[in-house]
Amino acid sequence: MRTLSVRFDPRRNSFDALRLLLAGLVAVDHGAILRSGEVQTHRGTGLGDYAVDGFFVISGFLVTSSYLRLSSLARFVWHRALRILPGFWVCLLMTALVAAPLIAVLEGKPAASVFSTAPTAVDYVVRNASLLMRQFGIADLLADNPTPTTLDGSLWTLFYEAVCYALVAGLGVVGVLARRRWLVLVLTGAVWALTITNAAGVTDFASLGSRLALMFLLGALAHLYLDRLPTGPGWLLAAVLVFVVAMVWAEPYRVLGAAAFAFLLVQAAVRSPFAFHLRTDLSYGLYIYHFLVFQVLVLTPVGLLPVAPFIALGIAVSLVVAGGSWFLVERPAMAHKGAGFVSVVERALGTARRRAAALD
């Protein structure tokens, strides 16, 4: 049987393009909500939910690949931190120091009020700097927007992303990723079972975390079992049918269609005839800034436009901001992947492991 491992080329695939597409779909969904205040879902799942699920599938695949390729805990942690934290921290600062005063002025308030009215702009940066979003608003801004008070409602997923990174690191350190991949299959099954019992009302435990963990683990499994994933048209058709049935009848679709969705997404990324690597990766910047851009635009004459042109203009502005984030923050940060201190940490960890082994 021909498997996906034969088709997968780490240097030539469509993961970058898919991430940009998914970020765009999240932006479309949020744009409609922020313009109208109405949330459109089918059986509890909206367009943005599918896109976020897709992000976690792709992240699971690529982050697992990264750990196995690097074979170094210190370097893995450093690379993950460089990819997510600088852009996030600058986004917090831009929101607090630029966007919040601008919004205050647009609402007829003194720009400086965001630094004196609780919760303040400084609170926003400090309380959210750990990735766990504890404060979504500043002062009394956006109180009259269709989606009130929340400045950037996309950032909450980044904490869960970081938790998933930690999960990969933990599984890698104990040798599960390299030698006991079946344990990841068992773990994924357990999380899927929790998702099902949560949906059925039997349990009510970590429903949001289990949802994102499930999609991430399915992506990780796809990479670990590339040598077992079939590529035949029959398998693709079966996955499409399962996914469609899940979308139409299951609530949420994940109870039946999570694996089918992940399978189709990875197949598309690996097998797309348009596979290419994006030198300019705007997906992260688009994801973390679009919500804020839409909230600002609602306060301007652009907010009077019909939904479709409002979304189009908002995404265009967000892409410009994302370009600034990439060229001024993200790419310069990732240029430090080979920082010398990481090698020092690697050697220290290696020495500690050898000493621990000697004691055993």
Image (cartoon, helix red, strand yellow):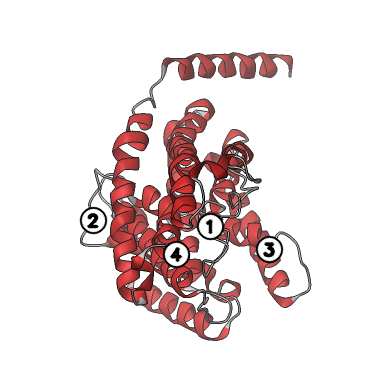
Q: Badge 3 is on which residue?
A: 207
Is residue 332 or residue 68 the one in the foreground? 332
Distance from Cα at disc 2 to Cα at disc 1: 31 Å
Q: Residues within 10 Å of mark 3 (few under 14, many from 20)?
A: some
The answer to whether residue 232 is above or below residue 330 is below
Instruction: Say how many tags the image has.
Output: 4
Amino acid type at circle 4 is Ala
Amino acid type at circle 3 is Ser
Q: Earlier in the sequence, mark 3 or mark 2?
A: 3
Q: Earlier in the sequence, mark 2 or mark 4?
A: 4
Q: Residue 297: x percent and y percent?
A: 39, 61
Judged from the image, the secondary structure of the residue bearing numbered disc 1 is loop
Location of the C terminus by quadrant is top right
Residue 51: mark in rendering: 4
Residue contact between numbered discs 2 and 1, judged by CB atoms under 8 Å:
no
Whether residue 165 is visible here, answered yes or no, is no
Side (left or right) of 195 relative to 45:
right
Q: Residue 154: x percent and y percent?
A: 50, 56
Distance from Cα at disc 3 to Cα at disc 2: 35 Å
Q: Badge 1 is on which residue?
A: 153
Judged from the image, the secondary structure of the residue bearing numbered disc 2 is loop
Q: Residues within 10 Å of mark 2 (few under 14, many from 20)?
A: some
Q: Residue 221: x percent and y percent?
A: 51, 54
Is residue 7 or residue 248 the one in the foreground? 248
